[in-house]
Image (cartoon, rainbow, N blue to C red):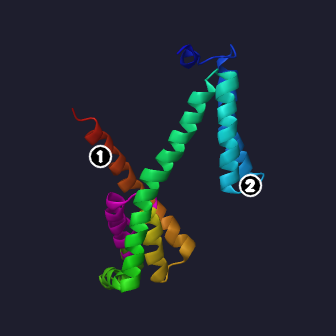
Amino acid sequence: MTWAMNVNPLGNLALSALVAAVPILFLFLGLTVLKMKGHWAAIIATTLAVVVACVVYGMPAQYAGLSVVYGALFGLFPVCWIIITALFIYNMSVKTGQFEVIKNSLATISDDRRMQALLIAFSFGAFIEGAAGFGTPVAITAAMLAGLGFNPLYAAGICLLANTAPVAFGAARCSRISSRP
């Protein structure tokens, strides 16, 4: 597999890196400047990545196609499976009325909005991060804070900030588990 060894196909490392970054740069450009829909920008960026890999880096088209299929399946099954089950549990708790019980239980602990934000966004969010991850804690805890009267944008910001520690711990924990002999 000599094609995998060539990290500098253009003879200039900076130019090779710039060409390799074309799909990512297009994705940012397509989403921000061109205001493309996300799925179309991603499809075009994936096509650009395959073209760059095959034409510039000499990757066989079969391997490039298999890489795209593998990436799509990896994104579809593990990520979607966890998010769908977490949202199913959330919707089930809303439908049965248990979400209101949880929300009211957390809200009655303290009338101080800062304490509510800490309990819900950080503590409950950390619990959900351990159970589901992949952005689900932010969505669920932001909805809870918005239900308690927080500004939705402010609630989302609080939950994003509060979720940084559990995400980092989860990644460290997973890497430690996977590196065991």
Amino acid type of the residue that numbered disc 2 sits on in the rendered structure: Met
Q: Residue at x 68, y 13 (%)?
A: 11
Q: Where residue 18 appears, x then y in whole percent?
A: 69, 28
Quick one: quadrant of the C terminus?
top left
The answer to whether one can see residue 84 in this image is yes
Q: Is residue 41 above or below residue 83?
A: above
Q: How many numbered marks have been drawn onto this rendered protein structure?
A: 2
Q: Closest to the observer: 52 or 144?
A: 52
Q: Closest to the observer: 140 or 66?
A: 66
- Mark 1: few, some, or many residues within 10 Å (few <14, many ≥20)? few
Q: Please tell me in which quadrant of the rendered image residue 59 appears.
A: top right
Is 130 a magenta residue? yes
Q: Which mark is residue 140?
A: none
Q: Is residue 50 above or below residue 153?
A: above
Q: Where residue 149 appears, x then y in whole percent?
A: 49, 83
- Mark 2: few, some, or many residues within 10 Å (few <14, many ≥20)? some
Q: Residue at x 65, y 48 (%)?
A: 42
Q: Closest to the observer: 8 or 46?
A: 46
Q: Is residue 60 left or right of residue 146?
A: right
Q: Nearer the viewer, mark 1 or mark 2?
A: 2
Q: Is residue 67 above or below residue 126?
A: above
Q: Closest to the observer: 144 or 46?
A: 46
Q: Where residue 58 appears, x then y in whole percent?
A: 64, 20
Q: Which mark is residue 173?
A: 1
The answer to whether one can see residue 117 in this image is no
Q: Cα distance, mark 1 to mark 2?
A: 37 Å
Amino acid type of the residue that numbered disc 1 sits on in the rendered structure: Arg
* Location of mark 2 (residue): 36
Q: Is residue 82 left or right of residue 176?
A: right
